[in-house]
Image (spheres, rainbow, N blue to C red):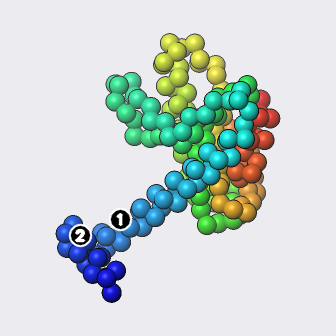
Amino acid sequence: MSYFVGIGIGLGVNRKGIAEFYTDLRGSKNWLKGAEGEALTDEALQALSDDYVVFHDFHPLGTDGQPVDWNVDHIVIGPSGVFILESKNYAATRIRPADSDPTTRKNLKQVQGTSVGFKRSLVAWSGGSLANLFVMPILVYTQPGVYVEKTRERFARVVPTRLLVKEIESSRD
């Protein structure tokens, strides 16, 4: 009973309707699931050797000096290259190729766009000296038991967390 009273008070204090409250609640659950996926990716990346440097939740600045409207979940830099990782944590345990699945297609577009944006930032920061650097986009699915049907999609890689370190360490630009 006190649970419902708390919700009622919350709705009254915030002056939100039930639909808006539900949307907010659903959004926070999605955010928590995403944060859990990023934590699982971080955990997997800890198996990399000390030759690699890993950054998490990077928010670059635009050419105007203001934060851009996107972030990079993980950046990995090491002897095998520069990698931009986008973590996804869904309920599905089978990830179909982008040509047959709109969610995979959307996620690939996101990680590829993030990689391009990050490279532009690097090129600008370096005064153009990093223009020939290849930045590898990797889409990481973190849910337990996930199976990825196609691990190479155009210029990106699509891997479950259990194969992530191997993919990074064996990559060549």
Residue at 41% x, 62% y: name it.
Answer: 27
Q: Relative to 71, is 98 on the left or the right?
A: right
Residue where numbered disc 1 is placed: 24
Decide: is 158 above or below 33: above
Residue 16's tag is 2
The answer to whether the residue labelled 2 contacts the one labelled 1, judged by CB atoms less than 8 Å apart, is yes
Classify 10 Å Cα crowding around label 1: few (below 14), some (14-19), many (20 and above). Answer: few
Classify 10 Å Cα crowding around label 2: few (below 14), some (14-19), many (20 and above). Answer: few
Q: Nearer the viewer, residue 145 or 53?
A: 53
Residue at 44% x, 41% y: name it.
Answer: 70
Q: Nearer the viewer, residue 101 or 85?
A: 85
Residue 143's tag is none
Q: CA distance from mark 2 to mark 1?
A: 10 Å
The amino acid sitting under disc 2 is Lys
Indicate the position of residue 81 as horizontal and vertical percent values: 69, 28
Q: Relative to 79, is 59 on the left or the right?
A: left
Indicate the position of residue 77 as horizontal and vertical percent values: 64, 29
Decide: is 169 above or below 163: above
Q: Is residue 63 visible?
A: yes
Quadrant in the picture for the N terminus: bottom left
Find residue 84 and report its image quarter. top right
Q: Is residue 156 visible?
A: no
The amino acid sitting under disc 1 is Asp
Quadrant in the picture for the C terminus: top right
Decide: is 153 above or below 55: below
Give the residue furthest to the bottom: 1
Decide: is 21 above or below 102: below
Q: Relative to 15, is 118 on the left or the right?
A: right
